[in-house]
Amino acid sequence: MRKKKPDNLKAKSMVAAAERDMTFTLTLLVSSLSGSTIIRNIYESFRILGDAILVSKGIELQKDIHKGHLNELFKLQIKTSRPLQVLDTLRVLRHSISYRGYSPSDAEIMDAIDIARKLFKPILSEVKKIIA
């Protein structure tokens, strides 16, 4: 972890990118060909929200410390229909897809989409308040 100057402008730009990417990703047709991309994009959009919080605080994590980005989201005091810790399941699944050549099942793809639909907007709203 490294301290830097807090950068709310960059954090807001990151949040806008995550929102844009998530909106696009949820329009993709679900298939065995698109599944890996859908899961990667969903995970990455959540990771970016966690990173935006850190950027707004002036904290830079070492590369590839994705759990630290998610930990920022786990600290949020929001009510959702699914626990925030389910995001770690996405992290592990994305890692398997990206580094082990894992092909997600239809059920895993649909679960990732369900996670995105139930958690992204509440998290997005809270992150926007934090970096305002």
Image (cartoon, grey):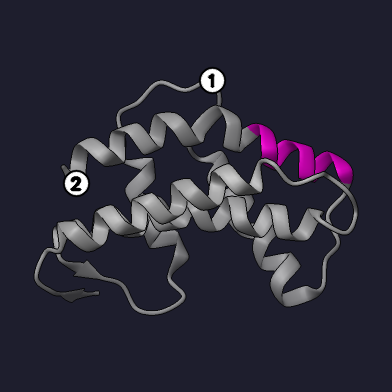
In terms of secondary structure, where does tag 1 sit?
A: loop
What residue is shown at x 81% (from left), y 56% (from top)? 34
Report x, y in % for residue 58.
15, 65
Point out the image quarter for the C terminus: top left
What residue is shown at x 16% (from left), y 56% (from top)? 8
What residue is shown at x 61% (from left), y 56% (from top)? 41
Residue 129 belongs to magenta span: no
User: Which residue matches tag 1?
Assistant: 81
User: Which residue matches tag 2?
Assistant: 131
Distance, label 2 to label 1, CA atoms, is: 24 Å
Note whether 118 is above or below 44 in the view shown.
Answer: above
Dot 2 or dot 1: first in sequence order is: 1
Q: Which residues are magenta?
A: 106-114
Label 2 crowd bin: few (<14), some (14–19), many (20+), radius 10 Å = some
Note whether 3 is above or below 40 in the view shown.
Answer: below
Report x, y in % for residue 23.
56, 42
What kind of secondary structure does the magenta stretch mostly adopt? helix
- Residue most extreme to the left: 5
Point out the image quarter for the N terminus: bottom left
Q: Amino acid at mark 1?
A: Ser
Residue 109 belongs to magenta span: yes
| Image quadrant where residue 118 sits | top right
